[in-house]
């Protein structure tokens, strides 16, 4: 009985820690990197006055690719944890008081506002608003990563308590026999 329960706890913790938290955290970290790289390409487009048309097109292509990768990676991270309702729609970030679902919705809104606030091809839009949306989007990405870390700590503590309880129960049952 103890071995069966230990195996069950091990499998459940592997699913939570590796399959959900680690994989999703990795996607979120890579999304943040892609988002930053998009902003870097955009900054070069915005401040450089000596770019050839070929260099401009290459930077716009880099920007577009990194924007798409950031969006895809966030979507992959969220899709990976949606089946765990405790993680996705119940557990809240300690300071933001928001679930991963709410943070994803905030990311989607901020990300779209960021994309729509400035056009690199025509160099039109509101750059001040664009930079503010970038900051808000990046903050939301960071909160998603922090929430996954916090959930991992919460889950680890919970499983440690369960294991301790199982061991004590096993020892008591063994002593009574």
Image (spheres, rainbow, N blue to C red):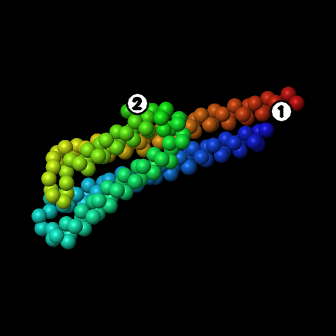
Tell me, for residue 144, which label it has, or none. Answer: none
Tag 1: Cα neighbours inside 10 Å, few (<14), some, or many (≥20)? few
* Residue 125 can be seen in this image: yes
Q: Quadrant of the C terminus?
A: top right
Q: Residue furthest left?
A: 49
Q: In x, y percent, where is residue 164? A: 68, 34
The residue lying at 54 percent from left, 40 percent from top is 84
| Front one among 170 and 52 | 52
Q: Quadrant of the N terminus?
A: top right
The residue lying at 66 percent from left, 45 percent from top is 10
Residue 110 sits above or below residue 57 on the image: above
Say whether residue 165 is left or right of residue 139: right
The residue lying at 42 percent from left, 44 percent from top is 145
Check disc 2 and report the residue beneath it: 97
The quarter of the displayed image where residue 107 is located: top left
The quarter of the displayed image where residue 168 is located: top right
Q: Residue furthest right?
A: 177
Q: Quote the CA–CA distance across marks 2 and 1.
A: 44 Å
- Are dots 2 and 1 in contact, CB under 8 Å? no
Say whether residue 50 is left or right of residue 133: left
Say whether residue 76 is left or right of residue 138: right
Q: In x, y percent, where is residue 28? A: 42, 49
Q: Secondary structure at mark 2?
A: loop
The residue lying at 15 percent from left, 49 percent from top is 125
Check disc 1 and report the residue beneath it: 174
- First-in-chain label (2 vs 1): 2
Tag 2: Cα neighbours inside 10 Å, few (<14), some, or many (≥20)? few
Q: In x, y percent, where is residue 147? A: 44, 39
Q: Secondary structure at mark 1?
A: helix
Report the label total.
2
């Amino acid at each position: 009985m103890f071995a069966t329960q230990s195996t069950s706890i091990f499998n459940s913790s592997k699913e939570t820690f590796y399959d959900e938290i680690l994989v999703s955290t990795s996607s979120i970290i890579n999304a943040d990197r892609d988002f930053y790289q998009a902003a870097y390409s955009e900054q070069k487009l915005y401040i450089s006055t000596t770019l050839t048309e070929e260099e401009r097109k290459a930077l716009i292509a880099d920007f577009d690719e990194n924007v798409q990768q950031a969006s895809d990676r966030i979507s992959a991270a969220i899709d990976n944890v949606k089946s765990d309702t405790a993680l996705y729609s119940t557990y809240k970030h300690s300071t933001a008081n928001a679930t991963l679902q709410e943070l994803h919705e905030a990311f989607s809104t901020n990300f779209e506002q960021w994309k729509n606030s400035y056009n690199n091809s025509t160099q039109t839009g509101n750059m001040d608003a664009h930079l503010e949306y970038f900051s808000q989007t990046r903050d939301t990405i960071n909160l998603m990563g922090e929430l996954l870390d916090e959930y991992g700590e919460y889950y680890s503590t919970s499983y440690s308590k369960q294991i301790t309880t199982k061991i004590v129960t096993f020892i008591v049952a063994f002593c009574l026999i």
